[in-house]
Amino acid sequence: MDPRPTTRRRADLAPRPTTRSRARLAPHRRLHPHRRLARTPHHARPIAAIVALAAIFALSSPQPTAAQEQSGRLTPELYFEWEEVRPFLLAGGMGPQISPDGGQVLYERRHIDKMRDRWVSELHIVGADGERARRLTDGGGAVWSPDGGRIAFVRADGDGAPQIFVRWMDAEGAETQVSHLTHGPGGLTWSPDGETLAFSMMVPSEPEWTVTIPGRPEGAEWTVEPKVVTRPNYRRDYVGYTDGGYRHIFVLPASGGTPRQLTDGDWNHGAPVWSADGSEILFSALREDDADYRFRESEIYAVSVSSGAIRQLTTRAGSDHSPVPSPDGRLVAYLGHDETDDAYYADNIYVMNMDGSGVREIATDRDRDPSGLRWAADGSGVYYNAPDGGAENMYFAQFDGPVRQITEGEHYLTVYSMTAGGMAAGVLSSAHEPGDVVVFDVAAGGEISRITDVNGDILAGVELGEVEDVWYESSDGLEIQGWIVKPPGFDPAKKYPLMLAIHGGPHGRYGFGTPYMWYEWQLEAASGYVVLYTNPRGSSGYGSEFGNEIENAYPGMDYDDLMAGVDVVLERGYVDEQNMFVYGCSGGGVLTAWVVGHTDRFAGASSECPVTNWFSFVGTTDGLGWYNNFENLPWEDPSEHLRRSPLMYVGNVTTPTLLITGEGDLRTPMGQTEEYYQALQMLKVPTAMVRLQDEWHAYFYRPTNTIRTWMYRMDWFRKHSRGQGPVT
């Protein structure tokens, strides 16, 4: 989600999609219409709301039962041994980086430090043939020098401060700390000649307003100075206060020395991108006085490395970002879209001359969200990642002609780097593969080779649940995609409890091998549950029209999409209709609270990091953008905010409902959970509030909080099971 403010436009919502191959099922006839609660809400008759809660946190989670004690099944404690090669979105990782000669792949390998309860990143390297896999050093954010002789990366120094290091990739492997920075660097990148490093870093600014109290006695123990806030956007989830300065672009000699600041002003500047000749650095920003109030607006600029002079390349109303210069330096490819009031939009791919002239759109036949642009060596077009439903693959957009799909498959493939010769490296996950480093030659038909197996030791001998891709019609005939995860040893003649997992965003999406969700869905299946996860209308990956289906109507029709999916699974005959459960985090928490206010068909629910009252939420979340999710400002007309709020339907709730939120959540603050909890207590509905300590939005910062969320949720479901529990 874009944290910057806005003018009066609906807020930007969740993440980016992917592409897929699909097995389509015949449309279903709803045999089990769900019961809608008939009672009238106490205060209003809600309808819908657009919550923009970053998709990567649109989550779901489980906990153990006797089934998890069985050998050959996933257990919560095995998660402590889990490893990741896909960079965590908020940690600034770079993803696998292939060497310029295509012979080796450098990647971050994250594991859990059980003693300190945190994820730790190490740099590993492996041959492109999968041989000679080994650990290099601690750190992350690594990038190869243009000649492949060195890598630059970020690691904490002896005082715990993040610094830039350079390592020679010869037999000696000498490492040198080349920076002594006061704040953490980001977006590390080499100049084309390998002599200079560019990065972004926060530069502190002086407080806009302070006062001095006179008459302080010597040695007096007065309380610390107050925090004075004057900016419209002053904090961000997973970061904290952000009003202490602005991010600027710096350059630093690769051999070490004093960093030189290239940009100035009270604006934040995006990651640096070198021009082909190294004379300029391109970046996205909005260097205008009212930038904090310009919703979903950004432009592309270039700064001279020698003089610091800045020129603006784009000028249109809308978003322009992610610039990538062509190999010959004449053109720049970038992503963006025209100014729009739509709640959801898919970015387009544009190309312009290096002076900003001659803008034209390419890949006009694709209505999907591109990312990771990379030029072909001959300058004939750009490669990019893109979603299509629940899958993600690589594509090639040529300047003259249709888009060509490079890779195919029902998987989630994200390419992070590519050589001039066309060797690509990325991470691939699928229904039964949690995520590993892969390489392929874009010119050889995209045949993918997996070169790591980081969780093979954990999964050896573990039976995983079958994952079935399903398509079904919602109440108005719109086709919806979902997936059913069945317990290991599944017997269709038995009756299993069902868990419905709802993603957030609401413009997030689930898919084949969805990152971060893979383990918990398989853990839930190992616990004896059938798991259903779907992409109701509003999800990304299905085009702008599908994404905008929920504009001014959330939660509403997407609720019908979810219930229609439950009915489809019930038609299969293997789900115990008396033992169905629902959960979700962020936007999924919103919909979970909405579901229990509109039906009593679920035996238990877990609403995690939810928004329950839009009227109080828009002014307490981390940014002004949320005001744009509604037709009117709340002080002009609060009826819409109340109409869309799950809290307004709490009088209908009879479902035992658990609430889980991090104490430090700045995206959906704890007050949202507290309001719903107090209302449920007032109505004597079975409820409990779990306040995760040392946790931001969702439950991924501390590994123990991830496991705690699974276990509290699953224990709540067991506690409120109607009759027979999970089939073990």
Image: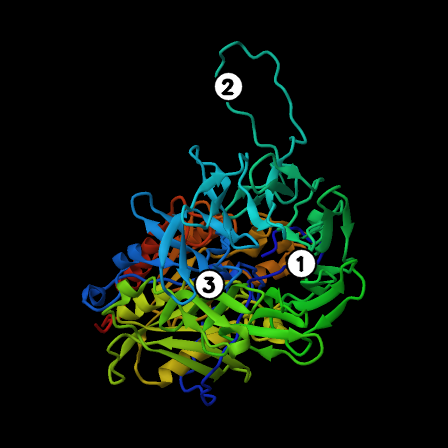
- The location of residue 417, given as percent across then percent down, is 53, 62
Dot 1 lies on which element?
strand
* Residue found 48% across the figure and 17% down from its top: 221
| N-terminal-most mark, 1 or 2 | 2
**Few, some or many residues within 10 Å of mark 3 (<14, 14–19, 20+):** few
Measure the alpha-carbon separation of dots 2 and 3.
Answer: 61 Å
Identity of the amino acid at label 3? Answer: Gly
- Residue 582 can be seen, yes or no: no
The numbered disc on residue 321 is: 1
Give the residue number, with chain letter if any, for mark 2.
222
- Whether 38 is drawn above or below 280: the answer is below
| N-terminal-most mark, 3 or 1 | 3
* Residue found 45% across the figure and 36% down from its top: 157
Q: Quadrant of the C terminus?
A: bottom left
Identity of the amino acid at label 2? Answer: Trp
- The location of residue 344, given as percent across then percent down, is 62, 67
Dot 2 lies on which element?
loop
* Residue found 40% across the figure and 65% down from its top: 436
Measure the alpha-carbon separation of dots 3 and 1.
Answer: 31 Å
Give the residue number, with chain letter if any, for mark 3.
103
> Which of the two discs, 3 and 1, sits closer to the camera?
3
> Which of the two discs, 2 and 3, sits closer to the camera?
3
